[in-house]
Amino acid sequence: MWSYIYIYLTSTYDWLLYLNREEPYVAVVDGLNQPTAVSAPSKVGEGGDVGLGFDVRISAFNGIGYGLPSAFVWMKPMAIPSPPRIVKLNLVAGSSTSLRVSWYHPMNDTGAVITHFVVSWELVTSKVSNITEGFSGTCQSFLNVFPVSQSYKHTVANLTPGTLYQVYVEATNIVGGSTQPYATPSTETQRRKADFPFGSLDSYAVSLNVRSTGSLTNDQNHSNAVKIWLSTSTLVLSWTEPSNFVVEETGDTIRSYKIEWF
């Protein structure tokens, strides 16, 4: 079934030129919806196994009617994809040089199947222009990252500990790349927990001692000292920081300690 529109030069000629094309007459045909093909097209506007596209022709009208129409031209409407959804940024357990980003498939392929995602990251600084790095891969490659789930995943590695980065993800198809939504949170400082060395012979180790009567304090005000009188029920715990380079290694400062006994 054919659909058609009328273009009247007396009232719409200026409107037709708004697309700034080289051709003198331009019209927008809207409402042409077709499903996205399973296979990626080899060129923009190419149809596929579903959604073959639309045949379009033009007829000219004068005082005695319409003349013969033009030859058919054929194309399938398509556009850049919708942006990826629910983009999240997380720390990586045990690593102070990595961040993990995850996301879900866009709501709409917009006529051409999404073939790749691009993960980009950059330092958050006061500079006007920062160097942006990125990684591109197929949809399936991001989907297969362990643990396998419905979300796409990528680990950004070899980052500088304790440095603030922002990460965003772009979906691409034959037409181009989507808008790039920032992850939530949009920035993250990669860091890991401060682990004490496990071996007892390490130079940065925890030690226990018995304590005779006296006092114990880390406060310069000696009146705040903890009085220790019962040596038979008291042990004194002492330790150093897990490393001389704890900030450089973990990306964060130690804010407190927890002592446990069993």
Image (tube, rainbow, N blue to C red):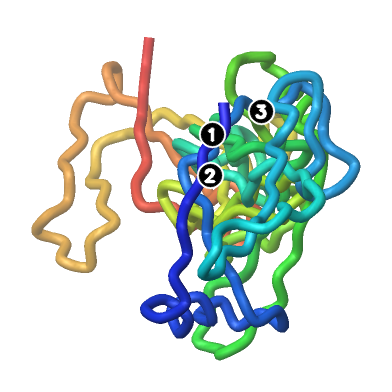
Q: Is residue 111 above or below residue 180?
A: above
Tag on residue 33?
1
Return the residue at label 3.
36
How far apart in space, not on screen, are marks 1 and 3 (Cα)? 10 Å
Q: Is residue 47 above or below residue 95?
A: above
How far apart in space, not on screen, are marks 1 and 2 (Cα)? 16 Å
Amino acid at circle 3: Thr
Return the residue at label 2.
82
Residue 131 sits in which quadrant? bottom right
Image position, residue 76 (x, y; %): 70, 41
Q: Is residue 33 above or below residue 14?
A: above
Task: Find numbered disc 2 in the image and state the secondary structure of the residue it sits on.
Answer: loop
Farthest-out residue, right = 42
Farthest-out residue, top = 262
**Quarter that holds the C terminus:** top left
Describe residue 34's horizontal placement relative to residue 215 as left or right.
right
Farthest-out residue, front = 64
Q: Which-is-in-front pick, marks 3 and 2?
A: 3
> Total number of numbered labels?
3
Quick one: label 3, few (<14), some, or many (20+) residues within 10 Å?
many
Of labels 1 and 2, earlier in sequence is 1
Image position, residue 119 (x, y; %): 69, 50
- The residue closer to the viewer here, 174 or 251, is 174
Quick one: label 1, few (<14), some, or many (20+) residues within 10 Å?
some
- The residue closer to the viewer here, 41 or 86, is 41
